Image: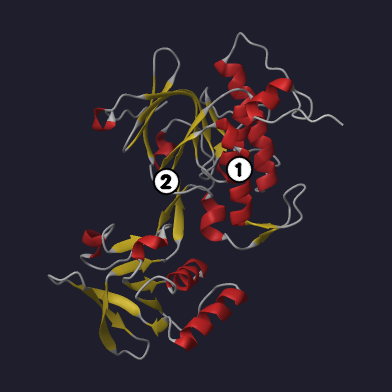
Amino acid sequence: MSEQHQQNPLNKAPIKTDALVIGAGPVGLFAIFQLGLQGIQSHVIDTLPYAGGQCAELYPDKPIYDIPGIPYCTGSELVNNLLKQIEPMNATFHWGQEVCGLSHLPNGELEVSTSQNTFITKTIVLATGVGAFKPKTLNVDGIETLVGTQVFYHPHNLSQFKDLNVVIYGGDESAVNAAIELSNIAQSVTLMHRRDVLKAPDHLLAKFEQLRTSGRVTFKAGQITELSRSNTPNNEIKVMHPDGSTNNLKFDALLVYLGISPQLGPIADWGVDLERKQVPVDTAKFQTNVPGIFAVGDINTYLGKRKLIVSGFHEATLAAFACAELIHPDEPVVLQYTTTSTKLHEILGVARHRP
């Protein structure tokens, strides 16, 4: 089994936890809930700066119809409901971090490193979906020097661009959404895509066209080919239009929405078995071949696997029970029901309801 060890980042004291959940998509969030019902508090790592994973990135406003007891909800609504559900569990989130190293300690615990923290944990629940989502970057010389100051990939907090001249580069739902939201607070908004076709729900396209007609947003068809640096806050990008003509466009902030791509990352070197970039698990505990490391959701594979959110919820439930058995080997793990268990009511912070 290969091991990777990374020196404690910034010489911080390690964060000790019983359970480390990697991935804050819907299945990861439900794993936090199920672990909490077992009395286990979680620390959570995600490469994104917010919860939701694929739901938040790929279909925040698209309908989901197959969540039990919820006839219809959007991806964003599902994530918000899960976040509300896990509030009593007091999980600690570490946003914008990617796992780097894993080492096995003599006492059987696991040491996990990110660029910012080191964690010592008894169990790991991999809920990374098809991989860590990373924005596709703009291939323009010199652009990387402006990332985080004037160039932003899939920014979540748009309020930081208030009163600025903003150029949005992309043509999907996220880009259109950003243009609509910023039309209310930015000094100017220009949405640019390589061609005059945008991919977004009809109601968003209709709203965008209204803003475009009123002059509150501008649309340009073209591709960014060059960055022109200057000594002023207003940098310029060179834009090539479909007819071959070019012009320069000034910006205070350039927001890039070129999509995201999942990457398995360093987890592939953790010694867990892989089958076509997925992790085989047993279906009793959803544990990998490495003791203490569990995998739930789209990251795992087994006979009969179905890549459905509801299947991931089931997997997270059984993994949480298995984690409890490992964390507390001398204590029986008793099946309790939230309808009747006083202990679970205390964890959830709810008064017992009597008929």
| Image quarter hosting the N terminus | top left
Residue at 69% x, 42% y: name it. 311
- Label 1 Cα neighbours within 10 Å, binned few <14 / some 14-19 / many ≥20: few
Determine the CA span between mark 2 and mark 1.
Answer: 21 Å
Residue at 77% x, 55% y: name it. 71
In the image, taking residue 112 as reference, residue 292 lies left or right, namely: right
The residue to which callout 1 is attached is: 84
| Numbered label tally | 2
- The correct choice, above or below, for 329 with respect to 51 in the image is above
Residue at 42% x, 32% y: name it. 270
Nearer-the-camera pick, 331 or 354: 354
The residue to which callout 2 is attached is: 47
Residue at the farthest left position: 231
In the image, taking residue 234 as reference, residue 18 lies left or right, namely: right
- The correct choice, above or below, for 297 with respect to 222 in the image is above
The residue type indicated by label 2 comes to: Thr
Residue 319 can be seen, yes or no: no
Which mark is nearer the camera, 2 or 1?
1
